[in-house]
Amino acid sequence: MAVVPLEASSKPTEAPSTPVTRLGEQVFDTVAEVGDVARFSILTIVWIFRKRPRWSVLVPIFYAIGVKSVSVVAITGTFIGMVLAVQAYHQFAMMGLATRLGSVINISIVRELGPVLAATMLAGRVGSSMSAELGTMRVTEQIDALSALGTNPIYYLVVPRFLACLLLIPLLTLMGDFMGVIGGAVISTQVLNVDSFAYWKHTRDFVDSLDIFAGVFKSYFFGAAIALISCHRGFNSKAGAEGVGRAATEAFVFSFIVILFLDFVLGLLWNSIYSAMYPQSEGLL
Amino acid sequence: MNHDGAAMVEGVRKEDGLIALRGVTMRFRYQTVLKEIDLTIRRGQTVCIIGESGCGKTVMLKLMIGLLHPTKGRVEFDGADVASLSGPDLVKMRLRFGFLFQMAALFDSLSVFDNVAFGLREHRVCGEQEAHRIVLDRLKEVGLPAGVESKKPAELSGGQRKRVGLARALAINPEVMLYDEPTTGLDPIMSDVINELILQTQQTKKTTGVVVTHDMKTVTKVADRVVMLYPLSRLEPGESQVLYDGPPEGLEDSPDPRVGQFVRGEAGERLREMALQRHGSGR
């Protein structure tokens, strides 16, 4: 029998690699990846309606994603409010507008910084951990074991995480907003000696429930994006510690980019809705 | 034991073939792993699939249970095309299989009890009390001590994990057991325990078995029939990927020298190739 050299066995039928084929592969991979994320998302939504996950599966995941994130989001929210107060005070004081700090700080928190920073923190804490957990399950064949036992892995692993992110991230955002408002108020009125009555009066004049709703509305999309991207990365993790680590990193990076993109798109959408509801405010937005 | 070679299998009636691979080719992007494989496994038979690492043995197991779909050809289970099954039919088919994964693939977040009860609870096979009884019975059958059911998989040794994996697979009373390298990473004594459990399962539960292994002791102990695969990249053009298909006793007498080399664990030819490569790269 003829001896087949060892190097011939490593990649037996690989096409010759040229810059053009590599570019083609990259384009093909990107398109396939986007298609795969879309398919994964649709399957997740289909499974939500097909079969309700058991409480014994849901409760620990809700606890890990919701309860365990409270401190992170609370601390982040508090510091955002405090930092905003410190940074804005001098500029406003120079113009004699220090009492207006309340409106600026609070509207920034409830409409933009609260939801975006809470989602970013959660993408780091929850998204990376979900991705690493599912990635480990992929490489240790636990996901295959689920399928072999007749259980759909999307139903069992993704749906509970998706529901937890979708339902709890808006609540965490509200809590982050609240802590930010308190942090900003404490620094402004107790440390920087802004008049408390004027601070809250301007807040009431300029921040209404629609602003809070705008932030919470966005956080539903952020929550869904974090869950889908992180679970998808975990499901497609490559073998080994490096593969799982890469999946966790990609989960955070992609989630962060999508959060900022959604923030921009939803901001535009919200402004159009607001303009349609209150035409007199057109020039102010 | 009932030793059936390929010729005998060809001769059996079609309905006796529980699992059939018909002209199966499996390709992952640029790498073809299986090519034009034809294999029929009879009800009640225990087939050991042997071969070098990377020759497609595990892929073959995953094709049988529908975790992978062939690029070309058909995989049939009880006459149905596995790739065409979906929804409840796919679940029904999978519940007729038990799968012992290479590293057991126990669910880390669940206790041993919950792992073994998983299939029973998820598919509401029985009530909670009955599930409790089945789980404890299965754990006892695989020789695990009382109290192990409350532990987490991370607290178990390799052999215990394998036995829990086997108990989980057996809990749903499968007709077919698939074993992916059941003795890999275990000491010789524990390997023998696992081999004995495979044999017991085959005899007491009358299951059909497909065992992917490198361990010739497993082959000798449990196989009715042995199929040896060879890596495609090392085959001559036109050669079949199945180098041997017959009873375990015939392995040593195979006319193909590569079969004997594998059985005896002789690396002679590979060592010569490596030496040639080193010599070539040194110049």
Image: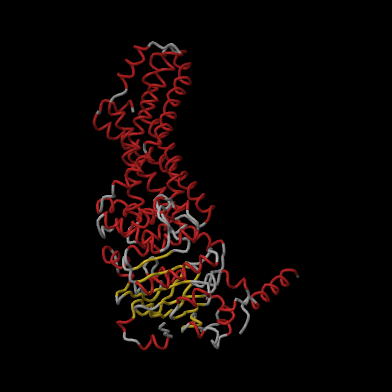
The quadrant of the picture occupied by the N terminus of chain B is bottom left
User: Going 44% across and 41% down the picture, which residue do you hit?
Assistant: A256
Outermost front residue = B146
Q: Nearer the viewer, residue B160 or B210?
A: B160
Q: Residue furthest right?
A: B283
**Does residue A48 appear left or right of residue B242 in this picture?**
left
Residue, x 40% and y 25% (percent of image)? Answer: A180
Dividing the picture into quadrants, the one containing residue A204 is top left
Q: Position of residue B16 (x, y in %)?
A: 32, 82
Name the colouring of the figure: secondary structure
Q: Is residue B13 above or below residue A85?
A: below
The image shows residue B1, relative to residue B90, as above or below, that is below
The location of residue A231, given as percent across then percent down, is 40, 50
Q: From this view, report whether residue B217 is shown above or below residue B254.
A: above
Q: Is residue B36 visible?
A: no
Residue A144 drawn at (x, y percent)? 40, 60
Q: How many marks?
A: 0
Q: Is residue A16 left or right of residue A165?
A: right
- Placement of A178 over or under A122, stated as above or below: above
Give whichever of B233, B144 is nearer the camera.
Answer: B144
Dividing the image into 4 quarters, which one contains the C terminus of chain B? bottom right
Would you say residue A168 is visible in this rendering? Answer: yes
Residue A223 at what x, y percent from top left? 36, 41
Depth order, front residue of B273/B190: B190
